[in-house]
Image (tube, rainbow, N blue to C red):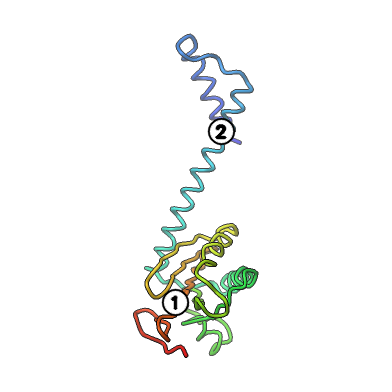
Amino acid sequence: MGEERVFVATLSKLNRLNHGNKFEVIGSKSVGLLAGLYSVVQKEQRIMHDKRSEESFLEQSYQTLQPMDPDTARTVLVEVKKILDQRGVIFFLRQGTCLGAIRDKGFIPWDDDLDLGSVIGLHGFTEEQVDPVIVAFKELGYYTKLGRYQEYLEIALMKSNIRIDWTCYRIVGDNIIHFPGVPILFT
């Protein structure tokens, strides 16, 4: 509201200064339309800033490795499960997330992300399903970043300051390859 008033006041001042040059006096309806347009432009700029902030925060999260808030992590994990379940994607907990679930019956106190995995070509999961799932995450406010590698797809997700690393492994021969290239027998 305040930005719109400032913008309208600036337009009125501009009209007074430029009247008689190449500009005509802008009527109140035009001012309203321009103020609405300004509001849309401001919203787009905020969205772009938020995306840069989200990407920056994601990259920073890999550097600082701060522990997750367990309550927020639990809420995000439940939402992620719901999204994947709705799209028929079978997934498993991996790395620290799996260890915490088994050993600690929760999250490891110093864990910095949620680690999930899926296997492309298993349980009907195909690579073509990944992009629509990413769109579903975006629609629910997740920042997403997709990396495509020879042996796997790496999808980094971020919401509520919780990073989710979802790796979709390709079956190569009779193996899936886990970074940094360790074959895991798959027969």
Quadrant in the rendering for residue 4: top right
Q: Is mark 2 in CB contact (under 8 Å) with mark 1?
A: no
Q: Residue at x 52, y 84 (%)?
A: 98
Image quadrant holding the N terminus, namely top right
Please give the residue where the numbered disc 1 appears in the rendered image: 170
Q: Nearer the viewer, residue 166 or 15?
A: 166
Mark 2 surroundings within 10 Å by alpha-carbon count, few (fewer than 14), some (14 through 19), many (20 or more): few
Q: Nearer the viewer, residue 33 or 19?
A: 33
Mark 1 surroundings within 10 Å by alpha-carbon count, few (fewer than 14), some (14 through 19), many (20 or more): many
Q: Residue at x 44, y 60 (%)?
A: 57
Mark 2 or mark 1, whichever is nearer to me: 1
Please give the residue where the numbered disc 2 appears in the rendered image: 37
Outermost residue to the top = 20
The answer for how far apart the CA atoms under marks 2 and 1 are is 47 Å
Q: Secondary structure at mark 2?
A: helix
Residue type, numbered disc 1: Arg
Residue type, numbered disc 2: Leu
Task: Confirm whether residue 5 shows in the render.
Answer: yes
Quadrant in the rendering for residue 146: bottom left
